[in-house]
Amino acid sequence: MPEKYPLIILNEFFEESEYHQYIQPVHTAIMSVAEDLRIPPFETTVVMSGDMTASVNRRTKDKSFSPERVGGQVAGKTMPIDPTNFSQVDLVMDMGMMNPVPEGTQLGMFIYLLAHELGHAVIGRQRTTSGDTPAARRVEPSGMAGLYGLEAIDEWRCDQLADIVLGGIATVNVDGNQSAVRYGLMLPSDWTADLRNVVDEVVYPAWPDLVWSYRIHDIDLEQMWEQLQTQTSQVLIFLAHNEARALSAGRPSPLTQLAGHRGVDLYLGPAWSEIMKEAETQPILASQDEFQRNQDDLLIVCRSAITKMWTTLGVTGRRLLDGTVYLDVSDPAR
């Protein structure tokens, strides 16, 4: 298997540490699954970085990476050398956020985050080798809706995969018995309160206010549409993490606990429930033969669900005779 899925470990702004001994076991666990699913070979470089922003910017053209996201910040990033095939992938791990000695929670976090990013590498390799890779222009609401939905479900799946790997490597003593560690129990949180904060700050009334700002000419169409797209993507990804970690802890869906909130009832709730209805029928990771079919089915649902959410906000797209896409903007539902 090392020949089929080679592993390279690279330190940037970071020295050899006790964390390094856990990289190989986590990589082996994930690549064993990849081999079982007949995923084509690829090479992984795990970049142990003491300055994640600098390490990511070394690998991008525009050098404008920021780890800040809705609801927090990223702690790892999967970066294919060639995005069209994922045959070589750099995984940048933010070691600046870790304690020098990997004990208890810190070790669990590292294992979980590394497994999560390796999951992205596996899915990326499948997506680029199993058939047509989904793509869209940012001016196309339906196409971008599909991509944002797939991104969110990728996060949800990678969280679940990472939780399984964490439990296979780390155990905890409970009443004299060894039990698998679960990330949702290792880092308990009030997921419902966390989600409420994001919905209050970003979704409602901010999204209808954003569309209304365009309607009354306070901002232009491009500014409104770019902001709505960016926030849609980040909110759905936050929601995916939130839901997966609550599931890990055996807690109910945080989104269902916010029923009655206008931002949930009008926008997020209908879209997410439609997407999850399809996603939950599919495995966390599918075989190479099944991947394209499952992705196609999910893509159709994501396009429909998120497009309907934007329609509720008053934003719809229609294709003109010359092939261009025209954005219609009406009053948002409140």
Image: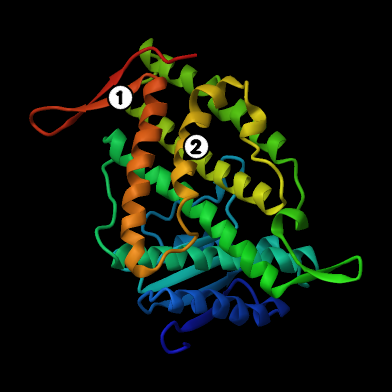
Task: Determine the residue positioned at 42% across, 30% down.
Answer: 228
Circle 1 is placed at which residue position? Answer: 316
Determine the residue located farthest toward the front in the rendered image.
Answer: 281
Task: Give residue 57's position: percent from left, percent from top.
Answer: 46, 60
At 44% from the left edge and 79% from the top edge, which residue is drawn?
Answer: 35
- Position of residue 245 measured from the top left corner of the image (x, y, whole percent): 65, 50
Above or below for 160 versus 11: above
Measured along the vertical axis of the image, is residue 209 above or below residue 59? above
Graded by Cα atoms within 10 Å as few (under 14), some (14 to 19) or many (20 or more), the crowding at tag 1 reads many
User: Which of pointers 2 and 1 indicates the residue nearer the eye?
Assistant: 2
Query: How many numbered discs sit on the rendered protein?
Result: 2
Name the foreground residue: 17 vs 184: 184
Instruction: Examine the rendered structure and indicate whether residue 88 appears above or below residue 234.
Output: below
The earlier-in-sequence mark between 2 and 1 is: 2
Of residues 306 and 213, the one drawn nearer to the viewer in this rendering: 306
Residue 201's x, y, as percent? 61, 28
Seen as rendered, the residue at the extreme top is 216
**Residue 11 place in picture, x, y as percent:** 58, 76
Q: Secondary structure at mark 1?
A: strand
- Residue in view at x 27 percent, y 45 percent: 136
How packed is label 2: few (under 14 Cα within 10 Å), some, or many (20 or more)? many
**Left/right of residue 307 with respect to residue 115 in the rendered view:** left
Visible in this render: residue 83?
A: no
Q: Amino acid at mark 1?
A: Thr
Q: Quadrant of residue 29?
A: bottom right
Q: Which residue is mark 2?
A: 272
Q: Is residue 233 found left or right of 47 in the rendered image? A: left
